[in-house]
Amino acid sequence: MDKKDVKKSFKIITLGCKVNQYESAWLEERFILAGYYKAVKGEPADVAVINTCIVTQKAAHQSRQAISKALRENPGGMVAAVGCYAQVFPDDLSRMKGIGLIAGNTVKGRLHEFLLNEADPRNPAVLLKDFQAGMPFELLPIKSFSNRTRAYLKIQDGCESFCSYCIVPFARGPYRSLDPEKALCMLETLSEQGYKEVVLTGIHLGRYGIDLKEDMNLSRLLQAIGKRRIPVRIRLSSIEPNEINDEIIEMMANENRLCRHFHISLQSGDDRILQKMNRRYTSQDFARLVERIYAKVPQAAIGVDIMSGFPGEEQVSHQNTFALIRDLPVSYLHVFPFSSRSGTSASDFDGQVDPAVITVRAADLRDMGKLKKAEFFQRCLGHEFEAICEGWHTDEKISVKAVSDNYLPLTFPATRELRGELVVVHAEKVAGNRVTGSCKQKSRTIGLEQPEEVNS
C-alpha cells in the first residue's frame, strides 16, 4: 500500500471548561473530515493534541502531566500543546522537550490546517498571537460531539472582570460574542443532527452581546431562540449572580425550552472576601437572587461554585459562607480550594491560609453540599421531569440513566437503550446519587415526537 493511502490517527486530550470541550470537539471533527481516524486507548497516534487549562495550579500541573504522558505514549508522533497554558506561559512549555507545536487560543481556528498540512515533529513550531481590542468572535461550526447526548454551543469568549484570583482574562482576552443569527443557525444544525438539548457556553456567558453593535444580550438571544421555535431545549452553563436578570428567570418559569437549572459562580459568602476577590455583588445580592429563583421556579436546580481558603479568609468568613448556603434552597455545590496562581493579584496578597485549614473548610462545605443535594432530591420526588437518556445504567441493560431539565440524575427500567431520546420520568425514590423512577412515554413538549411507549 502506498504511504499516502495509509490513514493517519489522532487523539485529543481536553482539560478544563466546556469551552475547551467545545473547541476540542470542533478540532476532532476537522480531523475526521480530513480522513484521520481516532486512535483507541493505548494506541500511539500520529497527532496528539493536549488542549490545556491553567485556571488553577492543579489544572496547570494536570496539563503538564497530560503533555508528558502524550510524549511518552506517542513516540515519533506530533504532540501539540494548545490553549490557555500555551497562550499565557509558552516559555514553560518550550522547556518540555519533544513538543512539536505550542499554539495559543488566538489561533485555534487555523490549528487544524497547520497540524494537517505543515506540522513536523522534527521542527517544533510556536503559533502565538496577542489578543487585540475589538477582535471578532471566531466561529467554530460543529455538527457532532462524540459520545455525548447533549451538544454544546460556544456563543461567547473572553473575560475582562480581572477577579484577583483568576488568570483567565490573560488566557482568553477581551469579550467576543457570536452573532445571534449565526447562533440560531448553529442551533438549527445541531437540532437537525438529532440533538435535543444544547448547552450554551462561554468564558463569561452573562456578558454575551456586550460587544455587538445591536442591542443584544443573553436574555434577548434566548427570546430569539424561542421565537424561531428550534426543537431543542436550552441549558445555560456557569453564570455570574449579577448577570441573571428577571427576564431570564421569567423565561425559565414559563418556557419548557429553557432548562430549569442555574450554575452560579458565587465564590464566597463573605462580603469582605468578595470585595478582595473583585467580585461585583454582595452576599445579600446572591441571597435575594436565589430566593427570587426559588419563588418563581421552585424545582429549579441551583448549583453554586464556592472557593475555600482565599487569602484573608478567617474562620468567621468561612462561617458566613457556610451559613449563607445552609439557609438557602441551593441544590448542590462545587467546592474549590484556593490555589495561588502566578500572574494574579491574589498570589501576592497577605493572609495566605494554611493548606491544612483550607482542606478542613472545603470538607465542611462539601458535606453541606451533600445535604443540599439530598434535600433537592427529596423535593423532586412525586413529580414528572423531561429527561435526556444517556444510555444503559448498568451492564445488565435493564435500566436507563438520564438527566432531567433541572439536572436531576435519574434511572428507570427500560427494555431498550433510548440513548439521546427525550422522555418523561416520574421521580419516585432516592437511591444514592440518583433518583429512580418510571418512564411511560417520550416527550413531545418541544415538538420532537408523539408520545410513545418506551417499554415496547
Image: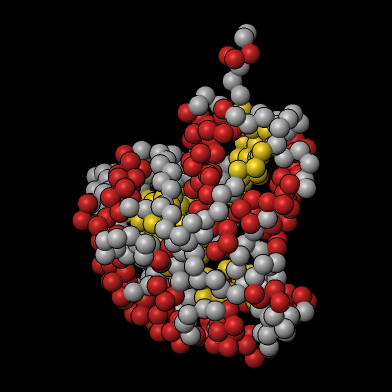
Horizontal side of 54 relative to 241 (left or right) equals right
Q: What x and y, as percent, mark residue 67?
A: 71, 45
Q: What x and y, as percent, mark residue 210?
A: 36, 65
Q: Quadrant of residue 71?
A: top right
Q: Residue at x 48, y 85 (%)?
A: 282
Residue 369 sits above or below residue 32 on the image: below
Tell me the quadrant of the picture where the C terminus can be found: top left
Tell me the quadrant of the picture where the N terminus can be found: top right
Q: What x and y, as percent, mark residue 194?
A: 35, 40
Residue 164 sits above or below residue 128 on the image: below
Q: Residue furthest bottom?
A: 316
Q: Residue furthest top?
A: 1
Residue 366 visible (yes or no): no
Q: Residue at x 69, y 80 (%)?
A: 349
Horizontal side of 446 relative to 236 (left or right) equals left
Q: Residue at x 39, y 69 (%)?
A: 300
Q: Residue at x 43, y 84 (%)?
A: 285
Q: What x and y, as percent, mark residue 58?
A: 70, 61
Horizontal side of 19 relative to 259 (left or right) equals right
Residue 11 visible (yes or no): yes
| 27, 326: nearer the viewer | 27
